[in-house]
Image (tube, grey):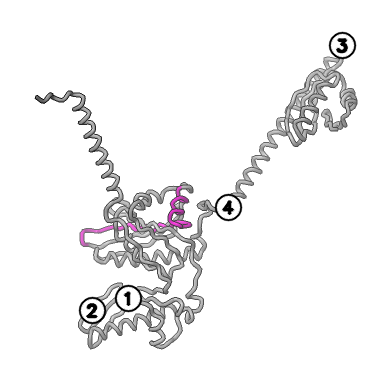
Amino acid sequence: MTLPATPLPRIALVLLALLGGLAALYAGGAFAQVEGDRGIAPLMASTDINVGGIEVNVTADTAEEARQTAWKEAQRKAWEKLGGPDISDGQLMGLVSAIVIQHEEAGPRRYVATLGVAFDRQKAAGYLGRSGETRRSAPMLLLPVTLSAGSELMYQQVNPWQRAWAEYQPGASRIDYVRPTGAGGESLLLTYGQTGRRSRNWWATILDQFGAADVLVPIAEIDYSFPGGPVTGRFTARHGPDNEYLGSFTLRAKSPRELPAMLERAVARFDEMFVEALAEGTIKPDPTLSRGSGMMDSQIARLIEQSRAILARAEAARNAATQTQEEEDVADANTAQAGAAAGGEGASVINLFINFPTPDASAFDAGLAAVRGTPGVRGASVSSTAIGGTSVMSVSYAGTLDELVGAIASRGYNVQRAGTNLTISR
C-alpha cells in the first residue's frame, strides 16, 4: 500500500521546479544577449599605398585581353593620382603589389570595372619621396553608428555600415583606426548610448581595453524612400568624449543594391575629413583621458592656480574688513571708557590688538601666557591664529598705553607701537 505524499513535500518539489526553470530562462536570456551573428573581423591593415575608385572601360578582341588592358590602365591612372614621375610600364608593374576589384562587369570583348591599386610602400617611396612616409595619428577607437527607422545600431547587429568600415583598407591613411570586431561582449559595451557619456573615467576604461587614445564616431543616417527605391545617407563625423562635431555630408543611391557602394564612398569621405582635422590639430588625444602619466594638463593647472589666487584675495579682503571693523569697535569703546573715567574715579580701561609671532604652538602659548600675566591686563583673547606666521590677540588693559608698553617690555619683549595697536617679539 502506497501512502499519499504530504502537502509540504509537494510544495517543495513545485518550488524547486520553478526555481530551476527561472534559472534556465535567466541563463538563456544572458546568453541571448551576446549570441547571434554580430561581429565582423576587420581586414588586416596593410602598409601598402592604396588608391581606390579607379574607373576603367576597355574594349578588346577577347575578354582576357580587355581585362589585362584595363588593369594596366588602372595602374597608370592610380600612379598619376599619387603624383608619381613618368616611368615605364615594366617599372610601374614592379611597384604594384595587388589589384583590388571593387566592382566589375565583363563581356565577350568589353571590361568595365572600378578598381583599386596597391603599391608597395618601400619600393614606391623611392619615386614618391617623402609622400610615402607620413606622420600618423594616435590610435583612434572607431565607433560607427547607424541611424535608420528610429533605431540606433553600432555592433549589436551586423549592418552594412559596420561592414563598410570592416572591409576598409586604411593602409595609406594617416589615421590609426582601432576597429573592434563587435563580437561577444563588445556588442554590450560599445553602444550608441556610450557616445553620449561624458565620464572621463568610463571612457578611459574603454580606451585602455582597446589600446586607443581617443575616439572617432562616424554616424550614418540611412533613409529609404520606399521599398526598392532611392536611399539617402546623411553622414556626420564626431570626435572625442565630448562628441565634438567635425563635419557632415549627404550621399544618395538609386536603389538598395547600390547602398554598399555608397557606403564605401562615405568611408573614403570620412577618412578625408579625419585626415584634414588631424592636419588642423582638431583631432588629438584628450589629455583628460590619460591615466598613465599622472600629470595634469598645463591649461587645467593654470585655471586651478587662478582660482586659488582669486579665493585667496577674497579671503584676505574679508579678513581685512573684519579687522577694520574690530579696530573701529575697540576705538569706540576706548573713547567711551575714557569719557567715563574723566567723570568718575579709578583707572580707565583700554582695548587694543597685539600682534605676536607664532612660529610654532609653544611660541603661541608662551606669548598668550605672557600677556595675560602682565599686571593690569583685564583680559586677552585670540582674534587670529597663524601657526608659522603672526597671530593677533585682543587685550583689555586698565591703564594707559604707555604703561602697558612698559609692563610688557619688563617681561623681556620688544614692543613696537602702530597707532593704538602693539607688536611684540622676543
Residue segment shown in magenta? 202-228
Inspect the image, locate mark 1, and give the three-letter code of the amino acid beneath it: Leu
**Vertical comparison of 139 with 361: above or below:** below
- Residue extending furthest toward the left: 1
**Of residues 80 and 351, the one drawn nearer to the viewer in this rendering:** 80
Determine whether label 1 and label 2 are within 8 Å by CB. Answer: no
Q: Which residue is mark 3?
A: 345
Q: Which residue is mark 4?
A: 297
Which of pointers 1 and 4 lies earlier in the amino acid sequence?
Answer: 1
Inspect the image, locate mark 4, and give the three-letter code of the amino acid beneath it: Asp
Dot 2: element: strand
Q: Name which residue lies at 76% across and 27% down.
A: 328
**Vertical comparison of 390 with 177: above or below:** above
Taking the image as drawn, is residue 338 in sight? no
User: Around disc 2, counting alpha carbons within 10 Å, would you say few (fewer than 14), some (14 to 19), or many (20 or more)?
Assistant: some
Inspect the image, locate mark 3, and give the three-letter code of the amino acid beneath it: Glu
Where residue 276 appears, as percent x and y from the top left, is 47, 66
Q: Name which residue lies at 45% across and 65% down.
A: 175
Which of pointers 4 and 3 lies earlier in the amino acid sequence?
Answer: 4
Determine whether label 3 and label 1 are within 8 Å by CB. Answer: no
Q: CA distance from mark 4 to mark 2?
A: 59 Å
Which of pointers 2 and 3 lies earlier in the amino acid sequence?
Answer: 2
Foreground mark, 3 or 1, reads 1
Q: CA distance from mark 1 to mark 4?
A: 46 Å
Q: CA distance from mark 1 to mark 2?
A: 13 Å
Q: CA distance from mark 4 to mark 3?
A: 70 Å
Q: Which residue is mark 1?
A: 115
